[in-house]
Image (cartoon, grey):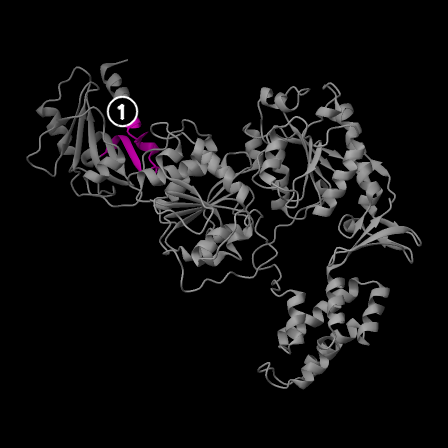
């Protein structure tokens, strides 16, 4: 290597260690805030050995010489001459570049030209971008960001953070990171938060989670994140608070909480620990209202990182996020919906799909094992005089009775309104028999150590049925062999931890609690005993199995395993065989915010607006359509009129224009009251409507089914 090449190599390393991205002239981009361009072009075809840029604007030069050349006046004159030679197409912070470095690879000299009396000083290292920005009194928000090192980061994480910062420097205030499940979204967020707090004026960041147990998980990740300048954990450098009350310590740099708890902080309403354990209810679209007297200023947070942002926290709760209008919003998701992209102004800074993550070896692929039964494909018939149990969902009461006539049920009704225990048993038996014959034939057969299996059920009641039948199918195993992980099952965090680590806990049955964000690396089988229409939810659920795991870690919980090189998706309902839906924003039906119970209460008090009357007619029509003849007859016995007749009368009255305008509940409104008098004066009829609306579950005893194919 020539002496000049040795000096250049040393200078490149020195610049890199100080946070400068060293690139050739043709490779210049604005993706990093601090860039040192080799052979930077100047006027008159001159070239500066290194031209330094902060935030896309030139700030200084570095003249490099061979090791044996002294840094004398000739070198100084050459370097300082370059400070006035910027071409007109090159942005700069000052017309004359203020900072000059000269180096021969052994020595480094520096001068600030704005101080005429100042001489060159000897340095051991080039200034960091932040130090140089402070010397120049530059106040640009992101100017102090050093080059992001690839060390310790996957390329997708490096790309996400680099593009995020470039996006914010370009003036965007919202950005979406789409990173596949298992690609390390939270780790990426840790690095983003660390850099914002370390190198920009940001002093307080909110990490928003979907539910409380994901907050605990995030708190753990920030506590173990050590990709910092000195290797210390994030939470020892910056004060990290997972919020459990309405008080945010003012010295907190990172606040972790749910949107529900943030709302309680803003409004001063108390929220008990555990009240935000559940996910956001996406079916409730009633917008949250904020009062004028709020407990936090709108600039309290400099940035808000929204975990699992594909969920509807920006719909019902959008007012809470919009209140902090000066904060940068960063979304994290593996499955963006169209409305997610719209919320983040279509500024998707990375799109790292599950397919890419599998190709890169970050995640594992899967194979489908299909179990098809006649009932789950074609539905079935409940025979006349067949013994059944009927559960009234509104009250929870259970009655044993006999079916009065033959009644067909569709496959889509299974485990919603009809429970067929035989169908559940056949599926579980087929899975049990295939584990060591078809799925894992190379493993020593041992039913005590079947692969960790996660089953998605239709509802909590369905999950209970699966657990009870699984205990019979996998007989002679431990009491904790199969367990529910649902909101009704106790401490979900403890159950997930046990499922992840315990040898004896082999099958977990859930609804959606373990569908997003939960990491169980030894999981080898994901079974669908419910269908899924949403592409986003399906990808999240499927993604529970993609995590890689070391062989030793796997054998700690599954002793007869060798390694995990794929996972099995056991499809018992045809979930893999149809297209999933992605609803574009603006095409979904307008949600009805009022419940039937509240609607009937308002009507009983005479609040008979056009909207309420039309809602009542619509709901009566729907309830009538799904009711049995005996139920329709019971309603007539209570009211003297059919449900559909009340609905028709209301629609006809609007069509004919027979109704006086509704001005106030205090007016007579006689023609309106006449349409609903049979309900307003009849609490029993109103209660019966609520029972019919909630519906019933028919439990067969035990039902019939047969295998079509496995």
Q: In which quarter of the image is the C terminus?
A: top right
Q: Which residue is at a point 30% across and 34% down the rendered structure image?
A: 35
Image location (x, y in percent) of residue 662: 60, 82
211 up-or-down from 667: above or below: above
**In the current view of this chain or complex, which residue is farthest to the left?**
117
Element type at mark 1: helix
Q: Quadrant of residue 659?
A: bottom right
- Residue 18 magenta-highlighted: yes
Q: In this view, does 8 lie to the left or right of 623?
A: left
In the displayed image of the protein, which residue is found farthest to the right? 385
Is residue 555 among what the camera can see? yes
Residue sitting at the far top:
1
How many marks can you see?
1
Residue 4, quarter of the rendered image: top left
Q: Which quadrant would residue 493 be assigned to in this image?
A: top right
Residue that numbered label 1 is attached to: 14
Q: Which region is colored magenta?
A: 12-41
Residue 459 appears in view? no
In the rendering, at what x and y percent does residue 540 appear?
A: 60, 41
Which percent across, then down, holds residue 445? 75, 20
In screen coordinates, is 97 left or right of 198? left
Q: How far across and down, in percent of the image, does residue 38 sit?
A: 27, 29
**Up-down relation of residue 526 to residue 204 (above or below):** above
């Amino acid at each position: 290597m020539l002496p000049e090449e040795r000096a250049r190599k040393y200078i490149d390393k020195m610049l890199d260690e100080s946070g400068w991205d060293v690139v050739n002239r043709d490779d210049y981009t604005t993706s990093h805030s601090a860039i040192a361009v080799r052979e930077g072009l100047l006027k008159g075809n001159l070239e500066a050995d290194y031209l330094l840029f902060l935030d896309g604007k030139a700030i200084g030069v570095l003249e490099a010489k061979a090791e044996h050349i002294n840094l004398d006046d000739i070198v100084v004159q050459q370097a300082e001459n370059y400070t006035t030679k910027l071409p007109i197409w090159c942005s700069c912070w000052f017309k004359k570049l203020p900072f000059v470095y000269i180096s021969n690879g052994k020595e480094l000299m520096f001068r600030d030209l704005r101080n005429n009396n100042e001489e060159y000083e000897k340095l051991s290292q080039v200034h960091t971008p932040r130090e140089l920005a402070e010397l120049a009194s530059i106040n640009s928000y992101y100017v102090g960001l050093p080059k992001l090192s690839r060390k310790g980061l996957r390329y997708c994480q490096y790309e996400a953070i680099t593009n995020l910062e470039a996006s914010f420097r370009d003036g965007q205030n919202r950005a979406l990171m789409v990173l596949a499940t298992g690609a390390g979204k939270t780790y990426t967020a840790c690095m983003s938060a660390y850099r914002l707090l370390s190198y920009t004026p940001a002093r307080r960041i909110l990490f928003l989670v979907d539910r409380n147990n994901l907050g605990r998980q995030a708190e753990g990740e920030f506590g173990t994140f050590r990709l910092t300048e000195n290797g210390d954990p994030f939470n020892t450098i910056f004060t990290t608070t997972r919020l459990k009350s309405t008080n945010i310590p003012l010295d907190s740099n990172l606040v972790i909480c749910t949107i529900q708890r943030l709302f309680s902080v803003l409004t001063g309403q108390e929220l008990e620990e555990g009240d935000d354990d559940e996910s956001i209810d996406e079916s409730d679209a009633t917008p949250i209202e904020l009062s004028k007297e709020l407990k936090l200023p709108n600039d309290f947070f400099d940035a808000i990182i929204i975990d699992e942002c594909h969920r509807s926290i920006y719909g019902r709760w959008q007012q809470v996020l919009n209140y902090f209008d000066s904060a940068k919003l960063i979304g994290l998701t593996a499955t963006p919906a169209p409305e997610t992209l719209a919320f983040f102004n279509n500024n998707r800074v990375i799109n790292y799909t599950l397919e890419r993550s599998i190709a890169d070896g970050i995640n594992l692929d899967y194979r489908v094992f299909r179990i098809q039964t006649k009932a789950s494909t074609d539905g079935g018939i409940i025979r006349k005089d067949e013994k059944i149990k009927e559960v009234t969902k509104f009250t929870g009461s259970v009655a044993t009775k006999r079916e009065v006539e033959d009644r067909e049920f569709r496959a889509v009704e299974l485990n919603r309104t009809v429970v067929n225990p035989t169908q559940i048993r056949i599926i579980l038996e087929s899975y049990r028999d295939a584990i060591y014959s078809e799925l894992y034939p190379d493993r020593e057969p041992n039913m005590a150590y079947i692969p960790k299996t996660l089953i998605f059920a239709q509802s909590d009641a369905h999950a209970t049925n699966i657990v009870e039948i699984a205990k019979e199918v996998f007989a002679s195993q431990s009491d904790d062999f199969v367990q529910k992980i649902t909101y009704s099952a106790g401490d979900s965090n403890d159950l997930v931890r046990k499922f992840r680590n315990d040898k004896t806990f082999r099958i977990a049955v859930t609804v959606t609690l373990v569908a997003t964000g939960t990491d169980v690396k030894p999981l080898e089988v994901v079974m669908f005993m419910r269908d899924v229409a949403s592409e986003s939810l399906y990808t999240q659920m499927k993604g529970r199995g993609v995590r890689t795991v070391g062989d030793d870690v796997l054998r700690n919980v599954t002793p007869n395993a060798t390694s995990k090189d794929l996972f099995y998706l056991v499809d018992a309902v045809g979930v893999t065989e149809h297209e999933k839906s992605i609803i574009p924003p603006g095409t979904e039906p307008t949600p009805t915010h009022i419940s039937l119970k509240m609607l009937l209460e308002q009507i009983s008090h005479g609040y008979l607006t056009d909207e309420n009357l039309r809602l009542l007619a619509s709901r009566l029509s729907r309830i009538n359509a799904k009711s049995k003849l005996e139920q329709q007859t019971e309603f007539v016995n209570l009211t003297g009129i059919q449900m559909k007749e009340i609905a028709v009368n209301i629609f006809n009255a609007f069509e004919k224009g027979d109704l006086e305008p509704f001005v106030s509940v205090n007016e007579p409104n006689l023609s309106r009251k006449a349409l609903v008098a049979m309900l307003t004066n009849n609490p029993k009829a109103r209660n019966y409507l609520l029972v019919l609306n909630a519906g019933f579950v028919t439990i067969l005893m035990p039902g019939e089914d047969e295998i079509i194919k496995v």
